[in-house]
Amino acid sequence: MSEELKLSGKYTLEADSELRIQKKGGTVKLYVTLISGSAEILGAELIKDKKYELMIAVHKTICTSCGCVLHVEFLDDEIEAIYISKESTMSQYRNYHKNLEEKRMDAEKKDKRGPIAMVVGVGGTGKTTFCRIILNLAGRSARTPLYVNINVGRGAIPIAGVIGTSVVERFGIEGGFWKEGSPMYHFGCITPKSDYNLFRTLTKKVAKTTLESMNAKKTVKYSGVVINTCGWVEEAGYNHLIEIAKVFGVDTIFVSDEEPLYQKLLKDVPSFMKVVLLPKVWCTFPDNRIVARNWKINKYFYGPNLSLTPFSFMIKFADLKLYGINSCKPLKGEKKKTKKSNEVQLNAINPTPALIHHVLNISDAESTEDDVLGTPLVGIVFVSEVNMKQKFIKVISPKLCFVPNKLVLYSKVKVINDRN
């Protein structure tokens, strides 16, 4: 950050207030230091006198429950406004966390599964932000909940077009919750509407695997699950939300700033499912979604500050088993196929320059006869070059993950950055 352009300010916050940082566009960098008192970002506490470097793709809030003094450094041409607001919603979020914590303590006493919470709402209303808050608060209470991200458009774990699950064992200011080795599954699009039947099949498989995995470790079992959903809440999308709640055994549904959806769910879900209407999260706006998605994708490949150099390697056409995957629906009048063959259809894809910038997901499956949709991925790469003359593609990856025998699944998701 250039010293001549850098501005700084000291901000004194009263109890139950927040510092709001409104960026201009794209991804911006700023530095925050807690001088005195206590403060938190998305439920994660700041350490006194530690200077935090934050790369932000959306507007940011820093909250305090008992008052604090903050020092902030930034570039004048990147920040629209910084101001203090007394309209903080963190006290309400702490109450939601307290309710979930009571269920976790009850689960410990009775040796049963902890709370399973689902967060729903249209895009841009703060679902992912709320998930981060309650997961961070759970971590501060020494809990290790499972985070299930089926919001394929946002891609919190690890990127868009993928459904990911991860045990949250740590909490942090800016780092993501996904950790190396956590299960992730291919969908290949940023909206369930692209292939609704495929998405339904995939979420059922993920639900079954997730619930079974909870029994392996009691701390995870008692801590429960937090599920982040897509912003498709009308018609078939709404019906799928109800289906997700059933297959995961959800007991609490948080509705993000959507009164009509809240009222509809109150009528349609069983009485044992508690439905809670959340207040609007200030730092989330619909316009931020595309920026945040691209930022998450680039962060996966190039690191938090986009400063890392990922691996680059070539794959010969002869070694590439590339497939597109979609739902397989019987034609009208066609006899019903077996359950396995009726779920998905794999279509071989020949490499062309049209693959450039596209994400490719490397499956642990080695044959099209395997349960490819339900098999976790072993890696994610994107195509930087297609050489038709020498018959190879060049891919970028944060790790060396290509194994010739594995199936490679085509994704419609693209990597967009200044390096392309």
Image: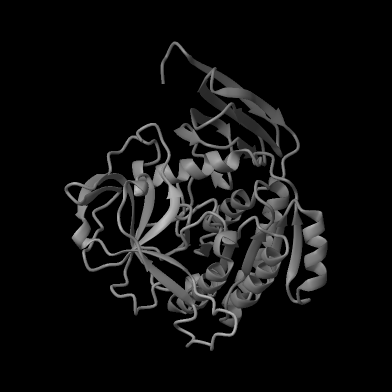
Query: Which of the 4 image quadrants contains residue 380?
Result: bottom left
110 w.r.t. 82: above or below: below
Say which residue appears at 58% left-offset and 43% top-offset: 289
Work out which residue is located at the far top of the displayed protein and give it. Answer: 4
51 w.r.t. 325: above or below: above
Quarter of the image with the N terminus is top left
263 w.r.t. 53: above or below: below
Query: Which of the 4 image quadrants contains residue 240?
Result: bottom right
Q: How many marks?
A: 0
92 w.r.t. 113: above or below: above
Does residue 351 appear in the picture of this structure?
yes
Direction from residue 273 to residue 307 in the image, left or right: left
Quarter of the image with the C terminus is top left
Say which residue appears at 39% left-offset and 36% top-offset: 305
Instruction: Give coordinates of residue 326: x percent, y percent.
Output: 47, 67
Q: Nearer the viewer, residue 149 or 393?
A: 393
Work out which residue is located at the far left of the displayed protein and give it. Answer: 390
Q: Nearer the viewer, residue 237 or 9?
A: 237
Instruction: Give coordinates of residue 70: x percent, y percent.
Output: 57, 28
Instruction: Give coordinates of residue 329: x percent, y percent.
Output: 54, 76
Work out which residue is located at the far front of the displayed protein and give it. Answer: 333
Q: Nearer the viewer, residue 144 or 14?
A: 144
Say which residue appears at 75% left-offset and 65% top-offset: 275
